[in-house]
Amino acid sequence: MDLKARKSFFEQEGYLIVEDLLSAEEIEACQAEIHRLHQFAAGQEPDEEKERAEVARRHVQREPFAKDETQGNNLPVLRKAENTRQYSEVFRNLAQHPKLIAVVQELTGSDDLLLFRSTLMFKPAFHGSSHGLHQDSAYWPMEPPNLVTVSIALNDATPENGCFKVIPKSHLWGMQSWGHIAREQGEQLTDRKEVAEQQTDMPLSAGSALFFHSLMVHGSGPNTTPTPRNTALYAYFSPQVRYVPKDGKPGEKTFPVVAGLGGQTELTLVAQTDGRS
C-alpha cells in the first residue's frame, strides 16, 4: 500500500496496521526494560537506579482485578505505566522512532508533532483484565479531537491474550460517552448491544503497530493465557489541536515536541477564556 493509499484507508476506516515497525533487537530491549520497570515497582532496584525507580513507582498502576498481588517471580501484577518518557530512556526514544514518526506525520499531514501520551499497557498472564470499548478523545482535553494513537505490540497480540478490538469507521460517529474502561475479566466490553456486534479483533505480531484515530471506538478482552501481552502506547497531535482543560484543570500544559517546530523540545499550550489556545 503506497503512502496515498495508506492515508486514504486511515481516513475511511479510522485505523492502519503497519507490520514489522520494530526489529527483533528493539523488541528485546523493550521487553528487558519492562522487566526492569516491574522490578522497580517491587522495590528491587540497585542503588544506582533508585532515583529513576522512585519516579517510575509514581506512575505505575496495579491490576485492579488480579486475584494475586504478585506473579510467580514475586513481581507485582501491573495494569499500566503512564508517562514512560519521564523515567525510561528506552521508551522515550521509542516515542521518537523515525519509522513511527514518519507514519504519524503521514496520517496527520503535519511535519510538526507533539506527544500527548506515553504509556505501557500490561496484560499480565491470566490476570490481564478487559478494557471496555471507548473513544480516547472522550477523556482527553484536546480539541478538535484529531489525535493519532499508536499501539505497538511488544509480543504477539492475539484474541486469547487480549489483543485490541476496534470498530471500523466508528471515528465518524462523533464524540460519545462510554463510562468506565477497566472491567473484570468476564465482563462485557460494552452494555450497548448494537456496538458490541461491530467489534473486530486486531491481532498483531510482535513489533507491528496499530495506528488509530482518537475517535475510533476500541477496547480489548482479557488475557487468558500463561504469558503477558505488553503494548507501548503513544498519542500524537499537530499544533492545530488545542488544549481545552475542564473541571478546574490547569490553564496551561507543556507537551514534548517529537518532530519539527524548529527543533524545540517542548511547547506550552495556554487555554484562552474563549476556549482557544
Image (spheres, grey):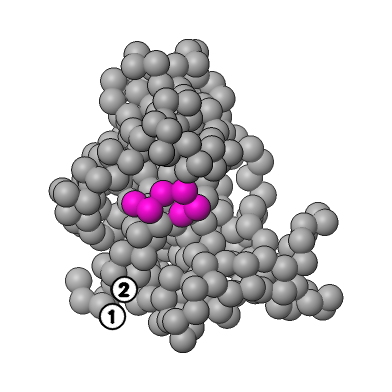
x%, y% of residue 167?
44, 51
Say which residue appears at 40% left-offset and 57% top-offset: 92
Q: Nearer the viewer, mark 2 or mark 1?
A: 2
x%, y% of residue 37?
41, 36
Name the quadrant containing residue 253: bottom right
Pointers 2 and 1 in contact (CB under 8 A)? no
59 or 162, which is in the foreground?
59
Tell me the tag on residue 102.
2
Say which residue appears at 36% left-offset and 44% top-offset: 231
Amino acid of disc 1: Lys
In the rendered image, is residue 9 in sight? Answer: no
Label 1: few (<14), some (14–19) or many (≥20) C-alpha neighbours in 10 Å:
few
Kindly give the residue lying farthest to the front in the view shown: 47
x%, y% of residue 104?
38, 70
Q: Give the residue at mark 1.
A: 4
172 or 91, which is in the foreground?
91
Tell me the tag on residue 260.
none
Numbered range of the magenta stretch:
85-90
Note whether 185 is above or below 94 in the view shown: above
Amino acid of disc 2: Ala
Q: Earlier in the sequence, mark 2 or mark 1?
A: 1
Say which residue appears at 48% left-offset and 83% top-offset: 261
In the rendered image, is residue 52 in sight? Answer: yes
Left or right: where 217 falls relative to 163:
right
